[in-house]
Image (cartoon, rainbow, N blue to C red):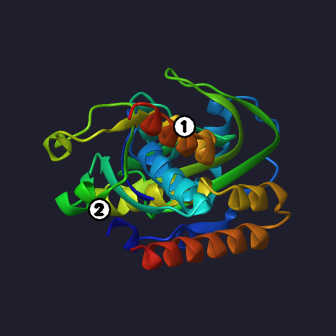
Amino acid sequence: MKIVAITACAGGIAHTYMAAEAVKKSARESGDEIRIEIQGAMGIENRLTQEEIDEADLIIFAVNIGVRDTERFEGKKTIVIDPGEFVANASKALQKAKKIATQSE
Amino acid sequence: MANQYLKISEVIRPQTVSLDMPGINCKEQAIEYLAGLLDEAGLLSNKQEYIQSVYEREKLGPTYMGNFIAIPHGKSDAVREAGVAFGRSNDGFEYLTDLGGGTAKLVFLLAIPNRMSADAYMAVLARLARLLVHEEFRDSLIKASSYEDVINAIFIGEKLLENLSNSRS
């Protein structure tokens, strides 16, 4: 599965990076392809291209604050999961995201 | 990319690692104790002023990260040279913040000089946060019995992060 994700945390930059690493870990464990954009105090890092967003099978917002530049995702289904869930149990959180994605189809 | 700056292995020193923080029961004691290690290593010009910068940062949001980890940090003129102190509490203690906390066993206290760019500062913090997601890394810190074990775990972890970043599509 091609997954793209955005991480952003109210807790701050360290929490945001932790969430990004946890999302990456979850994808690696399940054999999925992953691209992660980090939205932190320093701006946007590893910005997702429109092509990557368009090609994605699953779009995850691992955020507990607002996402910037959401117009890129217009008309797309995005799954919001609290970043804390990824940090606590990465693979469980990814499974949850996949489940929500298939349920609402 | 941000993580090309400082490595943790470059800013952690034998004198700033304590694998058995003595009599630490709360966040305040841990910060005081670890700041003392940084001070004794000659990294601070004014310990109290530095500690104040740590508390100012504490007000902005939780530095408790879950999984028994806390990363308090401060950027200040009172820091001569960038440093990281690592303290382990084998029994754990309650690390409380205004916005949530929990039991802490692994505490990293970062000291960053004011003159350092925000990027470089974030890079150390980001690296540490990324490393700490990995259970293998946390386990090796919990099991470490010497500074060498700690620095080895960090070396292995940093190498792993680099490989993962390089192999990223």
The C terminus of chain A: image quadrant = top left
> What's the distance in space between the residues labelled 2 and 1, CA to CA?
25 Å
- Quarter assignment of residue A74: top left
Residue at the spot of label 1: A96
> What SS does tag 1 mark?
helix
Q: Tell me the crowding category of disc 2: few under 14, some 14 to 19, or many 20 or more residues within 10 angstroms, Cα based.
A: few
| Residue most extreme to the front | A105
Q: Is residue A43 left or right of residue B89?
A: left
Q: Which mark is residue B161?
A: none
Label tally: 2
| Residue B63, percent from left and from top | 52, 37
Between B103 and B148, which is closer to the camera in this rendering?
Answer: B103
> What SS does tag 2 mark?
loop
Q: Is residue B42 left or right of residue A57?
A: right
Q: Earlier in the sequence, mark 2 or mark 1?
A: 2
- Amino acid type assigned to the residue bearing label 1 in the image: Lys
| Residue B4, percent from left and from top | 38, 74
Task: Pinpoint the chain carrying mark 1.
Answer: A
Q: Residue at x 73, y 66 (%)?
A: B150
Q: Which mark is residue A46?
A: 2
Task: Pinpoint the chain carrying mark 2.
Answer: A
Same subunit under labels 2 and 1? yes
- Quarter assignment of residue A65: top left
| Residue A33, percent from left and from top | 45, 64
